[in-house]
Image (cartoon, grey):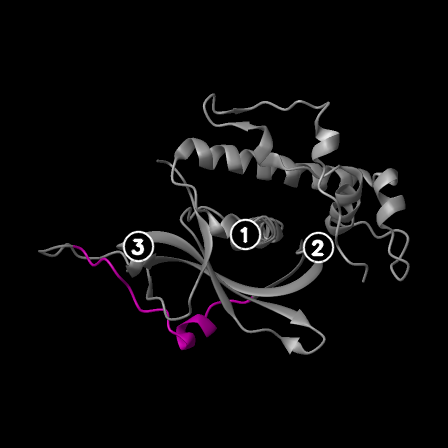
Amino acid sequence: MNIEVVGQIPSNRALYALPPAPTVKKRGRPKKYGIKMTTEQVKKLPEEKATVWMYGKFRKIRYRTLICRARFLKGREVRVVWSRFENDKGLTESRIFISTNPELEGLEVLRAYSRRWPVEPMFHQLKHAFGCCHLWQQKLRTLLRWMHLKMAGYALLQLLTVCKNQACLNISRIPWRSPDTTTAGMMKIALSGIIPRFSIRKGWNRYKQKYEFNFRDLIDQLIPDNSEAA
């Protein structure tokens, strides 16, 4: 699989510079690792500065970069970037980023890694808000059916949030929030009041393995809202 990876690694990972090319041919295997890239060796590298758009705003960064061999990747050549942010309090802690494609420049590695940030909130919502961390289904078909329902609900909330659906906002408007604020939680509150709630299990035909709803009878099956007002 020709897949290149960009990621962050702990500071205690063993990284080695490329060995110098031998001037005289000797017997035995050529040297695989050069000097170990300790903190002192990293400080000897030239430091570069840049202002780039990352994580939703322009940030000032300082970084050093070098092509190294990673011992934990069995000596594979990687592009390594030691990076720090500049802010009002000074410089942040140095972090190490690597790319399995050594042809990438240091700034390209940092930009590629920053693209993963928008994915983290989605993973958090899927795990905790939609219950994906409590998967209990034993059959693949049941799991896929459950995931499709969850994803459809997730997509609906996100689309309503992006479109700023006015019908939902009129129901879920929170007085102390800015009128321009629209969140998926507000859409969820609105949908719970718009969409009638009924017993979903009553429409499941266990013998035919599919849902068979009689929508004329759904009105009689609605679950009354017994939630107490806050």
Q: Secondary structure at mark 3?
A: helix
Give the spatial CA distance, label 3 vs label 1.
30 Å
The x and y percentages for residue 197 are 71, 39
Main SS type for the magenta part?
A: loop
* Amino acid type, residue under disc 2 in the picture: Gly
Q: Residues within 10 Å of mark 3 (few under 14, many from 20)?
A: few
Badge count? 3
The x and y percentages for residue 83 are 54, 65
Judging by the rendered image, the residue that carries numbered circle 1 is: 127
Judging by the rendered image, the residue that carries numbered circle 3 is: 73
Q: Quadrant of residue 53?
A: bottom right
Does 172 sit above or below residue 49?
Answer: above
In this view, the residue farthest toward the left is: 27
Task: Give the number of the mark in front: 1 or 2.
Answer: 1
Magenta stretch bounds: 30-47
* Amino acid type, residue under disc 1 in the picture: Lys
Disc number at residue 56? 2
Q: Residues within 10 Å of mark 1 (few under 14, many from 20)?
A: some
